[in-house]
Amino acid sequence: MKIDQIKTVNFHMENNKGELIVKGQLNGESDIPFHDDLKFKGIIALLNSIDKKNFSEAENENKFDQYVKEMEEIINEIKKYSHFQGNRI
């Protein structure tokens, strides 16, 4: 008998006005409380699917740079504190 330890994480992100920007669902195995390892795996999978060329072809490279900068700032904040749950910089 095999038991799958598949977990599901539902997430969404809103802007300052409470408008939905993105929502999604992650499914996978997790060994860390609150499925934080699964969240990292989801981030890595999404990052591996992004191509800067698409931003260039859409003549919107500045948006690519903006998103990368925001991710870098968030990662620096996560690394600084033992508790950081989506507080905006």
Image (cartoon, rainbow, N blue to C red):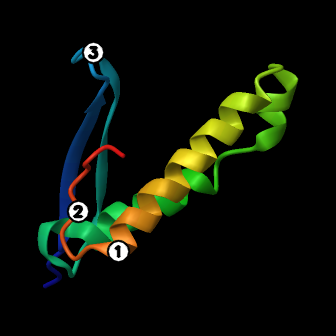
| Residue at image mark 3 | 19
Q: Where is residue 60 drawn, in percent x and y? A: 76, 23
Mark 2 and mark 3 in contact? Answer it, CB < 8 Å: no
Q: Nearer the viewer, mark 1 or mark 3?
A: 1
The amino acid beneath tag 3 is Glu
Q: Amino acid at mark 2?
A: Phe
Which residue is at 24% across, 41% downward?
11
Q: CA distance from mark 1 to mark 2?
A: 9 Å
Relative height, residue 2 to residue 52 (above, below)? below
Identify which residue is drawn at 86% across, 24% down: 57
Instruction: Report, in whole angstroms, how far the alpha carbon at label 1 lies from the one at label 3.
Output: 29 Å
Q: Quadrant of residue 77?
A: bottom left
Instruction: Assign a secondary structure to mark 2.
Output: loop
Which quarter of the rendered picture does the N terminus lie within? bottom left
Name the side, left or right, on which 3 lies relative to 64. left
Residue 71's mark?
A: none
Q: Callout 1: helix, strand or loop?
A: helix
Q: Is residue 68 left or right of residue 44?
A: right
- Label 1 is placed on what type of residue? Lys
**Residue at position x 21%, y 52% from top?**
9
For disc 2, the marked residue is: 84
Where 62 sits versus 29, above or below?
Answer: above
Work out how far the residue at label 2 is from the one at label 3, CA to CA, in angstroms: 22 Å
Q: Position of residue 88 (x, y in %)?
A: 31, 43
Residue 65: x and y in percent read 70, 40
Quarter occupied by residue 20: top left
**Residue 75 placement: quadrant:** bottom left
- Marks 1/2 in contact by CB < 8 Å: the verdict is yes
Q: Give the residue at mark 1.
A: 80
**Mark 1 neighbour class, 10 Å CA radius: few under 14, some 14 to 19, many 20 or more:** few
Residue at coordinates 18% horizontally, 63% vertically from top-left?
A: 7
